[in-house]
Image: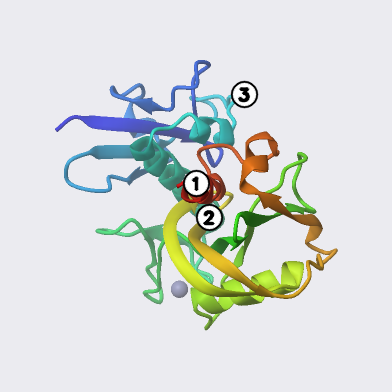
């Protein structure tokens, strides 16, 4: 089986000027690497993530992870988001959180271990819910305070310690827009490496209440008829938010 290579520098995936980030040939001597991770997902595809010092691989300021992800087919999306999340974890987890000792590469797993107290640290994932609330032929989209562009998207939020995904969904929707939901249906999930979110996507039905945006989180929220969505500023095609919206449109058209 041939090995494929992803290179990284300074905690970020490296791409060349054409936006290529996955290479079928080794470009650099692995002896010069700062760190190497085997990020193969199964036995059919071998992928190595090679972190190089900036003296060998200068940072390419043109590389934008969102743009690279937006151009990916599904299998490549998995690899790229995996590489980005491992890099964030590698950069941010150098010392044992229990005893402060420097962590070392785990012998078998994609993990780091503390040789002093034995604690093992795996790449960090932060589970979130993301939901499209629907009301007949309308769906609820919101413009968040942190959105850089004039975009309307689905509601999302982190799952808190001890919560189920369904509990988190009901709580987040109530907190962010003041409405109640019922009939929660799982849709699909997506890794979202900004920096280490894991999105669990759901549909939910409107059950009651008036839209009352929480000003700390939401600038505006509105009901959109499915026929309006084609011209609305909704998220790009590669996002799970958009996949929820597209599924809703397709269900309404049936
Ligand atoms: Zn320790």
Asked if residue 233 lies left or right of residue 215, the reply is left
Residue at numbered disc 3: 62
Q: Nearer the viewer, residue 157 or 178?
A: 178
Asked if residue 139 lies left or right of residue 238, the reply is right
Q: Residue furthest left?
A: 1
Per the rendering, the mark at residue 216 is none
Question: What's the distance in space between the residues labelled 2 and 1, CA to CA?
Answer: 20 Å
Residue at 37% x, 59% y: name it. Answer: 111
Which secondary structure, mark 1?
Answer: helix
Residue 37 in the image: state x and y as whole percent.
34, 45
Q: Residue furthest front?
A: 254
Residue at numbered disc 1: 243
Asked if residue 77 lies left or right of residue 59, the reply is left
Asked if residue 55 lies left or right of residue 20, the reply is right
Q: Residue furthest top?
A: 18
Tell me if residue 137 comes above or below residue 119 in the rendering. above
- Could you tell me if residue 128 is visible in this image? no
Residue at 76% x, 41% y: name it. Answer: 148
How many numbered dots are placed on residues in this image?
A: 3
Question: What's the distance in space between the residues labelled 3 and 2, CA to CA?
Answer: 22 Å
Q: Nearer the viewer, residue 8 or 230?
A: 230
Which secondary structure, mark 3?
Answer: loop
Residue 155 in the image: state x and y as whole percent.
65, 60
Residue 161 in the image: state x and y as whole percent.
55, 80
């Amino acid at each position: 089986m041939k090995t494929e290579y992803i290179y990284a520098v300074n905690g970020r995936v490296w791409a060349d000027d054409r936006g290529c980030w996955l290479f079928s040939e080794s470009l650099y001597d692995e002896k010069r690497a700062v760190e190497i991770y085997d990020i193969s997902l199964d036995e059919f595809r071998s992928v190595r993530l090679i972190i190089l010092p900036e003296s060998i691989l200068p940072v390419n300021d043109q590389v934008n992870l969102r743009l690279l992800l937006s151009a990916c087919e599904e299998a490549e999306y998995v690899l790229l988001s995996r590489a980005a999340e491992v890099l964030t974890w590698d950069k941010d987890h150098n010392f044992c959180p229990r005893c402060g000792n420097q962590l070392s590469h785990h012998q078998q797993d994609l993990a780091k271990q503390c040789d002093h107290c034995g604690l093992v640290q795996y790449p960090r994932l932060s589970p979130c819910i993301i939901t499209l609330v629907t009301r007949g032929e309308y769906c609820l989209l919101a413009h968040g305070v942190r959105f850089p562009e004039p975009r309307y998207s689905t509601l999302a939020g982190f799952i808190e310690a001890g919560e189920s995904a369904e509990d988190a969904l009901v709580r987040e929707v109530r907190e962010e827009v003041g409405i109640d939901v019922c009939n929660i249906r799982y849709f699909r999930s997506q890794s979202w490496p900004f920096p280490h979110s894991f999105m669990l996507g759901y549909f939910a039905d409107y059950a009651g209440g008036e839209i009352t945006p929480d000003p700390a989180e939401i600038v505006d929220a509105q009901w959109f008829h499915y026929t309006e969505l084609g011209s609305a500023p909704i998220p790009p095609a590669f996002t799970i938010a958009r996949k929820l919206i597209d599924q809703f449109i397709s269900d309404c058209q049936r």
